[in-house]
Amino acid sequence: MLLAYIVRRILWTIPFLFAVSLVAFALIQAPPGDYLTTFAATLAASGDIVDQARLQALRERYGLDQPFLVQYWLWISGVLRGDFGISFEWQQPVSNLIWERMALSTLLALSTLLFTWAVAFPIGIYSAVKKYSIADYTFTFLGFLGLAIPNFLLALVLMYIAVVHFGTEVGGLFSDAYVMAPWSWAKFLDLLSHLWVPVVILGTAGTASLVRIMRANLLDELNKAYVVTARAKGLSEWRLILKYPVRIALNPFISTIGWVLPNLISGAVITAYVLSLPTAGPLLLQALLAQDMYLAGAFILLLTSLTVVGMLISDILLAFIDPRIRYR
Amino acid sequence: MATRSEAPIIAETGPDVPAPQELALASQWRLMWWSFRRHRLAMIGLAMTILIYLVAVFAEFLAPFDPHEANRRALYHPPQMIHLVHHDAETGWSFGPFVYGYEQTRDPFTLAFSYERDPDQRIPLRFFGEGTPYDLWGLIPMNRHLLVPVDPGERYYLFGADRLGRDMLSRTIYGARISMSIGLVGVTMALLLGIFLGGISGYYGGFTDTVVQRLVEFTLSLPTIPIWLALTASLPQDWGPLARYFAITVILSLVGWAELARVVRGRFLALRTDDFVTAARLDGASEGRIIFRHMLPSLVSHIIASVTLAIPLMILAETALSFLGLGLQQPIVSWGVLLREAQNIRSIAQAPWLFIPGGAVVLAVLALNFLGDGLRDAADPYAQDGR
């Protein structure tokens, strides 16, 4: 039954991914003119000789004089084979540029998700159990503040405090010595020591909303008869809470992966730009501003696919935890 | 810890608790108001929201100067304090608002400006004094401002000045107009789309419902900022400020409608089977009367609450887009455009007051969130949850 559900859910993802790729392609098609005009202009600006034969070959390869659907087909069939087209600005295949950045983006999103859970879970339980206590009000207030401050503003303020009061920079994901270095254990540790800054910045809004969800769900459960029964049985209070109501209140917690992940990936674009992180966001922004459309399209496609996959994972996890969903 | 304080459904009598017979006769809107009034944060949010919108409406009058007026002698001018009382050995005590002048010096090596307060130089200010002439709402020619220097040639900077010596106070006030209105316009468009699609989805049900629901799910699963960025990047560069403003609101609402459509559909479905609707139907009320007289009033309160919670999201989105340079552009002044000045660490280290528009964003978003939260809780005054 569980297996059938998972298969059904995975099959559902395919039309979603198809729609995502259509949206991504429509977006990169939207600017006026085709990319080769931009490409020729870039070449001319850098003083290179514009080779008409090469332009013509590119035009044919990407089918730029063909209708939308043909172009889409040429693009998506290339993507499925791992060929994302070429970046006109960098003069390289797009696939050379994106993978390391996408990996770091994914790492950042996942670490932030873990951070969000780790912080929101205990605070949410505490706020619900000690409803209307001073700590509850403090967390509620901090939560509102966390939702109201744009991530990039928080990043800017942190940078300001670090520079003015501590004389250090907080940007980037690596120390200078490791930026170009090949991957090693030391580089990984260096990454971890830098990662917490963007993780905390990105995690604030998500944590705030998760705390509120956890608190509200748990409050609903705490009133129910089975809690009274368990208490009457003489179960210790914390054990009782963690064993029964929290498990049920956890349900919406997991389904939030579905929407926390898009928010994280979204927010990360701007924060990464402010903190100049080597993730997908800043390069996407640069590509969009330079109308380097195959590069931008690849990022948009991969970032949106990431969120679709996040929804898939959250649905499957939910089915594991809550048998009612499997039998729907 | 086992003692959970249960607030009684109808609280003890007090100044803001209506008498029972009044409660029984009160209209739905009155009940909502009573339930809303008990929510202290929401009342604060309401007051702050009204205040911010008033600032946006009367921007020309409240701003002391023209927000575009550059001043070469006030580059990165620090914020000044308003003083009320002055004591002088010769003239004795004098009362009235004034600021101390600042002496500008320039480092000969780094060429950086620095400012020194000059206690001998006072710039007296006057309430409702005459200043730069303007047309209020583009209609009424006026030249009075809330607080201007007595000598119209003088300048003062309560929020400091930016890199071109423009007054940050005036710019923040004018920014309120754009930032707050973009939230309203964007939400209105998102609402129209949401009511239309949510409505047909809830009304027809079946296949249409499935299609619209999939569309909503799909839209909600998209990471908004990359999509917004791509959409705004594809706007033609030669569009005027006004066309761009509307294009941005359309783009914001394209992603914002989904949540509203979900709310509308959900409420519509829940209400359709409610007892009072069945009762009205059994009474022989027409379909139109059921929808407009019976269902809509219960829907409206929920929609207002969701809309209030959607506005801050739009404001944040516009701020983010403009901050990245893909949203609104100079000479339009919005909080996001202003924060663009605070983008590099060198300028904020020299002029931390460039963060002030960010503070304005946080205040506005907080106010609207408090208000929306209170509205959501008050939207269903019959829900007996003891709030």
Image (cartoon, coloured by chain):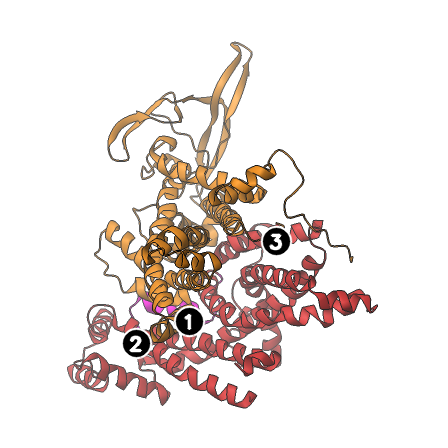
Chain colours: A red, B orange
User: What residue does disc 1 label?
Assistant: B217
For label 3, the SS is loop
Q: Quadrant of residue A206?
A: bottom right
Distance, label 3 to label 1, CA atoms, is 30 Å
Query: At 19% across and 70% down in the image, what residue appears?
Result: A33
Q: Chain of mark 3?
A: B
Distance, label 2 to label 1, CA atoms, is 20 Å
Q: Nearer the viewer, mark 2 or mark 1?
A: 1
Q: Which residues are magenta?
A: A275-294
User: What residue does disc 2 label?
Assistant: A25
What kind of residue is marked 1? Answer: Glu
What kind of residue is marked 2? Answer: Phe
- Is A288 a magenta residue? yes
Between A68 and A214, the residue placed more toward the observer is A214
Q: Quadrant of residue B272?
A: bottom left
What kind of residue is marked 3? Answer: Asp
Q: Is residue A226 above or below residue B106?
A: below
Query: At 35% across and 32% down in the image, what residue appears?
Result: B65
**What number is the disc on residue A198?**
none
Between A274 and B15, the residue placed more toward the observer is B15
Q: Chain of mark 2?
A: A
**What number is the disc on residue B385?**
3
Pinpoint residue B137: horizontal percent, then vertical percent.
28, 35
Q: Mark 2 and 1 residues: CB-CB less than 8 Å, in contact?
A: no
Main SS category, magenta section: helix
Q: Earlier in the sequence, mark 3 or mark 1?
A: 1
Q: Is residue A249 above or below residue A298?
A: above
Q: Nearer the viewer, mark 3 or mark 1?
A: 3
For label 1, the SS is helix
- Is B316 a magenta residue? no
